[in-house]
Image (cartoon, grey):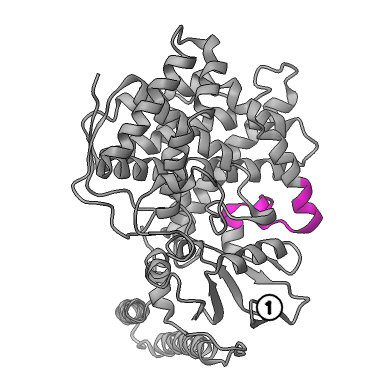
Amino acid sequence: MLDLKPTILGQSFLFVLLSLFTCAVTFLLQRHWTSITSEGSNDLEVAALIVLGCFLCGLWFFVLHREKRKSSPAPDLEPTVPIVSSATWSQDPFAFLVKHSGSGNYAFRKNGVMHLVVQSPDQIRGIFEHVGSELDRFPNNQKRFLRGERSLEFLFGEEHKTRKLAVVHAMDFNSFRRHMYTLSTLSAAYARRLDGCDAGQCKSVLKKFGLAAVSVIILGKQLTAVELEEYLRLFHQHFTGLKATRKWNIPGTTYFQGTQAKKELERRLRLRVRKCRRANNDDDSESVLFRLAKSDLPEDDIVDNLLMLWAAGFEPVRITLAWILAFLGTHPEVKQLVQQEVEALATRFCADKWDSSSSDAIWEAVRSMKYTECVLYETLRMRPPATHVSFGINPRLSSYRVGEAVVPAGWRIICGWTGTFNDPRVFEAAESFRPERFEHDPSPLGFTPFGGGIRRCPGRFFVKYEILLFLFVLFQHHRPHIQATTTPTMDKPNVSPRDLLITLGP
C-alpha cells in the first residue's frame, strides 16, 4: 500500500517520478502523433509544454507555500522554554517523554504549529480541569472524518455532555456482569492458546481475545471465527489509515483503504442499530449497542460512538496484557504473589461450581483482585497504551496560562503524562517495577493513563476488568511459566514485548 512520507527525500522522489512520467507520456504521444500525420506534432508539443509548465508552477507554488508556513514566526512564550526538533518528538514520543521526564516543559514546531509539552502533574491536572471551556480538542478534518464526526472525541460543549451521559449510561456494569460467564469462557479458551507462544504469537492471540471480548460487551454476542477474522482485517485497515502521514483519499493509499474499512464497519453497525430499534424483545438489553439504539440519540451519533468504543476497546487490552505478562516473566516474585491471590480468591468464590450461574461469584472474585490490580496500574505507569493527549486553545481566547508561562492562541498543548510517570520526584524509583506503590493509593497525583476531565476515557473500567478477568482465569486454571530473556526496554509502548515465551502448567 502506498503511504507517502513527509520527508525531503520522499518529496524529491515524488517530484522526479511525476516529472519522468509526464515527459514519457509527452514523448509517446508525440511519436504516435508524428506517425499518423505528415504535418508534425507542433500543436501537441505546445500543449504538452503548457501542461508540464503548469505542473511545475503548481509544484513550486506548493513548495514555496510550505516553506513560507514553516518559516513564519511564532509568538514566544513568557518565560521561554527549550525548543526541540519536531523529528525528535515524531519519531518516538514515548522515548522523548521518558528521556526528558522531570526536566520541565518543552516546545517544538510541527506542520507550522507550535506545540508545548507539559509534564508537571499539577499543570496537567489544571489543564484537564479547563478542558471544555478554555481548552479542547481541535483535530484536523481528515482524522475527524476517519474516526467519526459525531463521536465523543470531536463533540464540544453541551452536545458532548449529552452524548457522553448516554454513552456512560449504556456502559454501566450490568453490561459487563451479564456477560461475565461468556467472557470468562472466552478468556479460558484464549488463555489455553498461549501455551508455547512466543512474543509474536502472543500478540496475535491477545489481539483476537481483546476484539472478541469487547464485541461481546458492545454487540451482546460472541463473534464466530470467520467474523472475528473479518473484523480484525477491517480494523487493521482502519488503524493503518489513521496513522497514514498523508491524508490523501485516492485509491491505493492507506488513508483511502482506511476510509473504505470505516464505511464497511459503519454499514454493519447501522444494520444492527436499525434491527435493535425494530425489535420488541430485550434479549440483548444489557449490550451497549442495544441501550444506545433504544436511546433518543440520532442514528449517526450512535454509529460513530459505537465504532469509537469498539475500536478503542481491544487494542489497549492487547498491549497492556502483553506487557503484564512480560513484567511477570522478569519479576517471578510478583508472579508468585498474583498466583497466590488468584488461588485464594478462586477457593473462596468459585470452589463449588463453574457454570453460567456462577457469574456473580466470578464478578466478586475479579473485583477482589487487589494486588493484581496494582500490577495492572504499575504496568500502565511504565507502558501506557496512550503516551499523551493534545488540546487546542479556545479560539475566543488570546492566550492560556500554563504555570508561569502564557501560551498564545494558535499553540497546541500536549499533556505528556508518560514523562510524569517516569519522574522520580513523582514516583519513587520510577525506573523499577513496584506494584506495591499503588496498594495504599490507587490514584496518586499524576497517574492519568486514561486522561482526565470531561475527556476521560468512558470505557476505562471495561478495559480494567477485561484484563483482570483474563489474568484470573489464566492463573486459576494454569501455573504459567513465563520466560522474558530481557527486561522490557524503554521502547514504543504500542509495540509488544520482543522476547517472550509462555508455557502453561497444569
Residue at mark 1:
401
Is there any visible trace of residue 190 in the rendered image?
A: no
Residues in magenta, as a range: 145-162
What percent of the width, then of the height, locates residue 418? 46, 61
Does residue 221 lie above or below 292 as drawn?
above
Is residue 172 found left or right of 327 in the rendered image? right
Image spot of residue 354 (x, y percent): 45, 11
Q: Position of residue 49 (x, y in %)?
A: 42, 89
Amino acid under disc 1: Arg
Observer-nearest of 70 and 50: 70
Between residues 110 and 44, which one lies in front from this camera angle? 110
- Please, what secondary structure does the residue beneath circle 1 have? strand
Prevailing secondary structure class for the magenta stretch in the rendered image: helix
Taking 312 as reference, is 447 above or below it?
A: below
Residue at screen point 41% across, 45% down: 435
Q: Is residue 218 magenta?
A: no
Which of the image's four quarters has the N terminus? bottom left
Magenta stretch holds residue 150 = yes
Q: Is residue 380 visible?
A: yes
